Structure formats: C-alpha cells, structure tokens
Amino acid sequence: MADKPPHLKIVKGHTQKAACPLCQQPAEALYRPFCSRRCAQLDLGKWLTGGYAIPAHEAMEDSDVETLLAAHGSQQSTQVDDDS
Ligand SMILES: [Zn+2]
C-alpha cells in the first residue's frame, strides 16, 4: 500500500523539466520546449523545409491554450456584429 502505482511515476517523470528535442539540454521556459532561441529556430527551419512530420501537441500546455483562447475571445467580443 505504500508503493505508488507505476503510472504515477510515469506522470511525475513526464512533468519534469523536458529536454530540448534537438540537443537534449534542459529546456528553457522562455523557449520551451527548446533550450534556447537557436534550437527553436533550428526546429522552425526543419518545419519550413519539411523535415518534420505532423507533431503531437505536447509542446502546448493547457495554460497556453487558455491564454490563446482568452485573447481570441476578447478580440471577438469587441467585434461582434459591428457591421449592422
Ligand atoms: Zn537545444
């Protein structure tokens, strides 16, 4: 009973600071999930050149989604039916 279920260990490990997918160094919050602006731009370059397949949305967290939705919603609310 003292032992935690295995899946809890997996989740805990997943929430730890992620490594940069390009160079495996600890990710920087500012450039998440990358360690630096350089790696972020390198990854973008891969995207633009078609080096990547469609990725999972692991990079975007719920808080980020909510921020985007909030920004989008506030923009819409100021422009609803303005052409009457
Ligand atoms: Zn990196």
Image: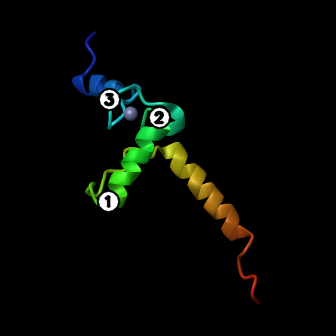
Residue type marked 2: Ser
Comparing labels 3 and 1, the label whose residue is closer to the camera = 1
Element assignment for label 2: loop
- Determine crowd level at label 2: few under 14, some 14-19, many 20+ residues with C-alpha closer than 10 A: some
User: Is the residue marked 2 within 8 Å of ligand 1, measured from its CB?
Assistant: yes
- Determine crowd level at label 1: few under 14, some 14-19, many 20+ residues with C-alpha closer than 10 A: few
Residue placed under numbered mark 2 in the picture: 36
- Identify the mark at residue 24; answer none if there is no mark: 3
User: Is the residue marked 3 within 8 Å of ligand 1, measured from its CB?
Assistant: yes
Residue placed under numbered mark 1 in the picture: 49
* Image-based side of 42 in relation to 5, left or right: right
Element assignment for label 3: loop
Residue lying at the far bottom of the rendered structure: 84
Residue type marked 3: Gln
Question: Which comes before the other along the chain, label 2 or label 3?
Answer: 3
Label 2 near label 1: C-beta < 8 Å? no
67 up-or-down from 6: above or below: below
Rounded to the nearest angstrom, the CA distance separating label 3 from label 1 is: 22 Å
